[in-house]
Amino acid sequence: MAAAVTEDWAPVIENCDLSSWREALAAALTHTNDEFPYLCESLGARMDPKLAQLCFLCGGNLDKLVGAWMAVHRASSPEKLQVRYGQLKKRTPIYCIQAVQIGKT
C-alpha cells in the first residue's frame, strides 16, 4: 500500500517473495512509467533464468534476455540452440502481449 502512495516500487520489487513475482511485475506495469525497465531488470536478476526471461523481455533488456535464454539452454548443441533461438524470435511478440495482459488483470 505504501508503494502506491509514495510511488516508490523499488522496495516492493527488491523484497517481494519470489512466489509472488507475477503480482509484483503486474503492479510495476500498472503503477510505474519511466522506472519500469529498471524494476523489470531488478526483479529478473533475483529469479531463475527461465522465469527471468519474461522480466527482461517486458523491460526491453534484450542483452539480459539473451543471456538468461542462453543460461537455460547452455547444455544444448549448437544445432538445438539455433532451433530454440528461432522459436524465441517467433514467440517474443506473444510473450509481450501476455505480459501486458498480466498487468491488466
Image (cartoon, rainbow, N blue to C red):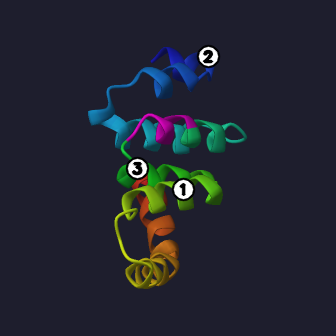
Residue carrying label 3: 49
Q: Secondary structure at mark 2?
A: helix
Q: Secondary structure at mark 1?
A: helix
Q: Nearer the viewer, residue 88 or 40?
A: 88
At horizontal 26% and vertical 35% (from top left) the residue drawn is 19
Residue carrying label 1: 67
At horizontal 43% and vertical 77% (from top left) the residue drawn is 81
Q: Amino acid at mark 2?
A: Thr
Instruction: Residue 19: say if magenta.
Output: no
- In space, the residues marked 3 and 2 are separated at their CA atoms by 31 Å
At horizontal 39% and vertical 39% (from top left) the residue drawn is 47
Crowdedness near tag 3: few (<14), some (14–19) or many (≥20) residues, C-alpha within 10 Å = many
Taking the image as shown, residue 49 lies to the left or right of residue 64, namely left
Q: Amino acid at mark 3?
A: Pro
Q: Nearer the viewer, residue 80 or 91?
A: 80
Sequence-first tag of 2 and 1: 2
On screen, residue 81 above or below 83: above
Taking the image as shown, residue 61 lies to the left or right of residue 65, namely right
Residue span colored magenta: 42-47
On screen, residue 15 above or below 27: above
Tell me the number on the disc at residue 6.
Answer: 2
